[in-house]
C-alpha cells in the first residue's frame, strides 16, 4: 500500500495557488497551501510533508528565511524544499543554496518541467523515508533481547540480528546484519538449527515450510551437558504483510527460565506427593493410636518408635526435595541411574500409588548400563507416567508393562504401555508440549493430560533424548517410548 505524498505550497498569490493546484492535482498528491511564511512553518510542523514548495517573494517573511527556519528544525531538516522565484541572478541562487533549498524553479516556469522535477523529488523522498524506517527497524531489532531473522521462500537467511547470530552460532557482524545472505547463500535455517539443537516436538516442525499453523509451539532444545545447562528457544513466525517477496520473519525467544520454572514447579508437586505422603501416613497413624486408643506402655513405645522412624524418613525425603529444588539441571550425579534400579523404582512407586498389576523387564545385559538421567529424575518420570495410567484408566486399575532394550551402544529405549484409553490424534500431538503459563491467572492445565508429561518431555529432551506416544493397535491403551542416552554418550 503506497501512501499519498503530501506537498505544502507556500505562496501569497491566490492565482499562483490555483495554478499549482491545477498542475499537481492530476498527479494524485495531497496538496496543502499556506498564504505566508509563519503559516507555512506551522503547517510544516503539523504535516511533515514529502515536499515543500516556497515562493521567494512573500510579505513579512520571505522564502529564504522560511527555508532557514525549517532547516533548523530537526523533524523538518531533511524535507525537500523547492524555491520558486522570479529572481534569476547569481546572488539569489547562492542565497537559496545557503538557506538549504534543494532545487529552484524560475518564473515563469515550464509546467512539464515542474511536474517532472516534483515527481522525481517526491520519489527520492519516499526512498529516503524508507531508508530511515529501515534504519530505525534495524536499531530496534538489534537492541531486542530476542533473536530475529528474515527468511526467503527457500528458508535461506536474508537477515539476522545480533541475538539470532548468537543463538545460531553465526559470526558477529556489527557493520551490516544483512550480509548473512551473502555469507550463507544456500544454508537454510533448518540446516543451522539442526547443527546445534533438537527440533521439538517433531510433529510441529513437519509444517515448517508450509502456511499451516502448528497446533503446538515449536522449540529448539540444546541438550544439557556436563559444562552447560539445557537451552530452550521458542520459535514463532511473524507476519510480514508488505514484504516484496514471500519472506518470513522468525522470532527466537529464550524461554529456558520459563521451562525450567515450570519443570521445577511440577517436579516439586510430584515429589511432595511421592516422597512425603508415605512417611506422614506412618507418623499420623502411630500418633493417632497413642493419643486416641490409650494402649499399654509397651505398645505405646512400639508406636512411638514407628512414629520416630517415619519422622526420620520424612526428614530425609524433605532433604531430597530441597536438593531437587537447588539442583541446576537434570544431570544430578556423575553416575546416572543404572537400569538395574528401574525395577525397585517401579516397585516403590506402584506400592505408593496402589498399582496392583505392573511388570518390569530389564535384560541382564542392561542392568549395569547407566542412563544420563539421575535416579531422582527417573523416579519423577516413572511416577508421572504411572500416575497418568491410573488417572485416565476407565476403572483406575491399569495393567502396565515396562520393558527396556538397547537401541545403540549409546542409547536405550524404555517402553511403558497400559490398557487404558485411546487418545485422539490431537491429544497425542499435545502430549509432550512443554507448557508454561503466560496469562495472569494460571489454570495449570493442558487439555487431555496433566503438566506432568510435559515435565517428562523436558527431562528427556534436555539430555538429548526423544519421547513418543502411540495408541496400542491390539487393544485400548497407550504405548510410551522414551529413548534416553547412556553415560557412555556423555563421557
Image (tube, rainbow, N blue to C red):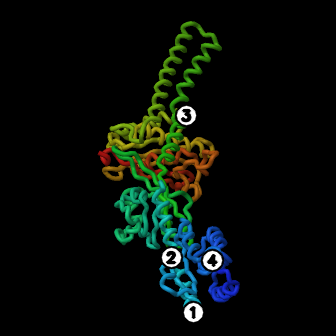
Q: How far across and how far down the image is residue 41, in percent?
A: 62, 70
Marks 4 and 2: which is nearer the front? 4
Look at the image and tell me in which quarter the C terminus lies. Answer: top left
* Viewer-proximal residue among 128 and 371: 128
Q: From mark 3 to mark 2, how far is it between C-alphas? A: 65 Å
Answer with mark 3 or mark 4, whichever residue precedes in sequence: 4
Answer with mark 3 or mark 2, whichever residue precedes in sequence: 2
Mark 1 element type: loop
Which residue is depicted at the point 52% across and 13% down?
A: 302
Q: Is residue 227 above or below residue 253?
A: above
Read off the residue under disc 1. 110
Read off the residue under disc 2. 127
Q: From mark 3 to mark 4, how far is it between C-alphas? A: 74 Å
Read off the residue under disc 3. 273
Q: From mark 4 to mark 2, how far is it between C-alphas? A: 19 Å
Answer with mark 4 or mark 2, whichever residue precedes in sequence: 4
Amino acid at each position: 500500500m503506497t501512501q499519498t505524498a503530501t506537498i505544502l505550497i507556500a505562496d501569497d498569490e491566490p492565482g499562483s495557488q490555483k495554478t499549482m493546484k491545477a498542475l499537481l492535482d492530476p498527479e494524485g498528491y495531497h496538496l496543502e497551501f499556506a498564504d505566508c511564511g509563519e503559516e507555512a512553518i506551522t503547517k510544516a510542523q503539523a504535516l511533515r510533508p514529502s515536499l515543500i514548495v516556497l515562493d521567494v517573494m512573500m510579505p513579512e517573511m520571505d522564502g529564504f528565511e522560511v527555508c532557514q527556519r525549517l532547516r533548523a528544525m530537526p523533524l523538518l531538516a531533511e524535507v525537500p524544499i523547492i524555491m520558486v522565484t522570479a529572481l534569476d541572478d547569481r546572488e539569489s541562487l547562492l542565497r537559496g543554496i545557503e538557506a538549504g533549498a534543494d532545487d529552484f524553479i524560475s518564473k515563469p516556469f515550464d509546467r512539464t518541467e515542474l511536474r517532472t522535477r516534483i515527481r522525481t523529488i517526491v520519489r527520492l523522498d519516499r526512498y529516503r523515508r524508507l531508508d530511515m524506517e529501515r534504519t530505525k527497524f534495524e536499531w530496534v531489532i538489534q537492541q531486542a533481547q530476542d533473536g530475529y531473522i528474515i527468511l526467503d521462500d527457500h528458508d535461506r537467511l536474508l537477515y539476522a540480528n545480533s541475538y539470532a547470530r548468537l543463538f545460531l552460532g553465526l559470526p558477529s557482524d556489527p557493520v551490516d546484519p544483512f550480509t548473512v545472505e551473502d555469507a550463507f547463500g544456500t544454508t537454510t535455517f533448518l540446516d543451522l538449527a539442526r547443527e546445534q539443537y533438537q527440533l521439538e516436538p517433531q510433529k510441529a516442525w513437519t509444517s515448517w515450510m508450509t502456511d499451516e499453523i502448528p497446533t503446538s509451539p515449536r522449540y529448539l532444545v540444546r541438550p544439557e551437558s556436563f559444562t552447560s545447562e539445557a537451552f530452550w528457544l521458542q520459535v514463532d513466525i511473524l507476519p510480514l504483510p508488505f514484504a516484496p517477496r514471500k519472506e518470513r520473519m522468525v522470532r527466537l525467544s529464550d524461554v529456558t527460565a520459563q521451562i525450567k520454572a515450570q519443570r521445577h514447579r511440577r517436579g516439586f508437586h510430584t515429589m511432595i506427593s511421592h516422597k512425603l505422603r508415605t512417611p506422614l501416613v506412618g507418623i499420623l497413624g502411630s500418633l493417632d493410636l497413642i493419643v486416641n486408643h490409650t494402649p499399654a506402655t509397651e505398645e505405646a513405645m512400639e508406636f512411638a518408635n514407628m512414629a520416630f522412624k517415619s519422622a526420620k524418613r520424612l526428614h530425609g525425603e524433605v532433604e531430597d526435595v530441597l536438593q531437587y529444588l537447588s539442583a541446576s539441571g537434570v544431570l544430578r550425579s556423575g553416575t546416572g541411574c543404572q537400569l538395574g534400579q528401574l525395577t525397585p523404582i517401579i516397585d516403590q512407586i506402584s506400592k505408593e500409588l496402589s498399582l496392583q498389576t505392573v511388570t518390569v523387564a530389564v535384560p541382564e545385559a542392561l542392568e549395569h548400563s547407566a542412563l544420563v538421567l539421575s535416579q531422582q529424575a527417573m523416579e519423577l518420570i516413572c511416577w508421572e507416567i504411572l500416575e497418568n495410567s491410573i488417572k485416565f484408566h476407565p476403572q483406575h486399575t491399569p495393567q502396565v508393562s515396562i520393558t527396556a532394550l538397547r537401541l545403540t551402544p549409546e542409547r536405550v529405549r524404555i517402553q511403558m504401555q497400559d490398557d487404558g484409553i485411546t487418545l485422539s490424534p490431537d491429544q497425542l500431538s499435545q502430549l509432550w508440549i512443554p507448557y508454561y503459563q503466560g496469562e495472569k491467572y494460571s489454570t495449570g492445565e493442558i487439555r487431555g493430560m496433566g503438566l506432568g508429561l510435559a515435565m517428562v518431555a523436558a527431562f528427556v529432551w534436555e539430555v538429548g533424548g526423544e519421547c513418543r506416544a502411540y495408541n496400542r493397535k491390539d487393544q485400548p491403551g497407550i504405548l510410551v517410548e522414551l529413548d534416553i542416552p547412556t553415560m557412555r554418550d556423555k563421557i
